[in-house]
Image: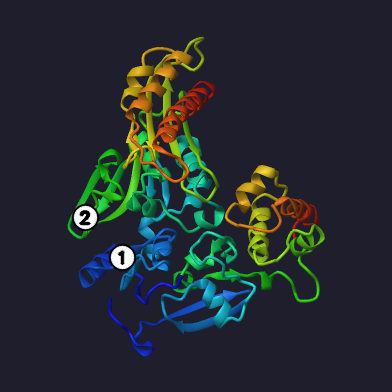
Amino acid sequence: MKPAAFDYHTPADLDDVFDLFESYPEAELVAGNQSLGIVMANRLATPEHLIDLGGVDELRGIDVADDVARVGAMTTHRDLERSAALKETIPMLPDAARQIAGPSVRSRGTLGGSLAEADPAGNYPAALVALDGTLHLRSRDDARDVSAEEFFVAYMFTDLREDELIESVTVSRDPFPTDRTGMAFEELKRAAQTFPTVSAAAVVRVDDPDASEPVVEHARVALANAADVPLLVGGVSEAVEGEPLTDETVAEAADVAEAAADPAGELHADTEFKTEVAAEYTRIALTNAHERAIET
Amino acid sequence: MTEHTTSERPQRDVQLTVNGDAVTSTIEPRTKLSDYLREECNLTGVRVGCEHGVCGACTVLVDGEPVKSCLTYAVQVTDSTVETVEGLSDGSELHPIQEAFHEENALQCGFCTSGFVMSTKALLAEHPDPDDEEIEAGLCGNICRCTGYSPIYDAVYRAADAMEGGD
């Protein structure tokens, strides 16, 4: 329960970080330490050097512009949860942040830490896939953008190279006009602090919220913990777009999610149960997102 | 992994304000904030239960926010202000939250209590008049194996009433 000895480095900016990468290629980056701290406490990880990104101010912060919302990798769950600008424009992100563990974890844990860990049960990976978000990766000599969908490669394995870090995440606001878009992040979990059994992230845009039967223009659903990566349920768009949302089209979307889900069984939730939950939570998330789209 | 003798192990300076007092030390970076507070500051109200972020008994406030001190290395929060359960009372009178836990029998063995009290302080700072849902969300990082939680809810409501208008 005590970690092995390590040396500790506190870079002040990205140049310092890349210098440290070169000096200590085996070092681990630490953000909020809410996941790494657990594996180090159990000595499942025994890094000799930790590079703490906590002092790199340029990695922190939320900036919502007219066209795009940007969140720095070192932004804590608490800051995301409390962001009035995000609640107004991309409410799925504060909603997903609020549902992570308890306040004492959220005050330290970060967006970038969660994305880099890439647990398929994590909240941000599924949320960002549903939002078609982009990760901005930096190395000493290079900057590249990777879509959330492409970033998560396999179970806890990402496209991030050894010499890179996650600088920020952006979500384009273009597809999500606030007056006719609704978002929902719904998770089933046994207790607040456990990872969810399955979560569903949904976004729905309608043509005219004041119409008697608003037509769904755009719908996207991603599932967490229903496969070894956050799972975009591609068939949902086909099931519900181009017509008003009805019990029938939602049921069709749920069937599509059930067919797409490929979850690993766990102690408290076998494959069959998680597949059922994937369908049911797709239904709940789509319904709630739609309700918010027409009431805005 | 490199084997270090004690004297060769890396050391770092840390400076904190703990319950109003400035504290400066040179420590191993692997020193958890929980161990630092208990061993260097002699604040043994910080309970060490699971030591991997599950039980919440080690919850303290860092710059006013609740933190699991076992999942935080002391060096990570250098220059911060830390408050432990010892900082709540001046020694002669209980803080309203402590008083409420006492009055409502919101503990049996008491091991989890200082963590719950600190989480309650953070909760009431954000929601001075909380409902059941807000209490659950605010205290879900803390585990109590004695009370069944119901008296803890009662204590939070009593403390909220007592602290009306600030503490």
- State which quadrant residue A275 falls in: top left
Q: Earlier along the polypeptide chain: callout 1 or callout 2?
A: 1
Question: Which residue is pictured at 36% across the width and 71% down the height?
Answer: A10
What x and y, as percent, mark residue B100? 78, 59
- On residue A147, the disc is none
A134 relative position to B80: left or right: left
Question: Which residue is pictured at 63% across the width and 70% down the height?
Answer: B84
Question: Which residue is pictured at 59% across the width and 62% down the height?
Answer: B64
Outermost residue, top side: A212
- On residue A28, the disc is 1
**Residue A158 in the image: above or below residue B50:** above
How far is mark 1 from mark 2, CA to CA?
13 Å
Amino acid type indicated by mark 2: Arg
- On residue A161, the disc is 2
Protein chain holding label 1: A
Protein chain holding label 2: A
Amino acid type indicated by mark 1: Glu
Question: Which residue is pictured at 48% across the width and 72% down the height?
Answer: B32
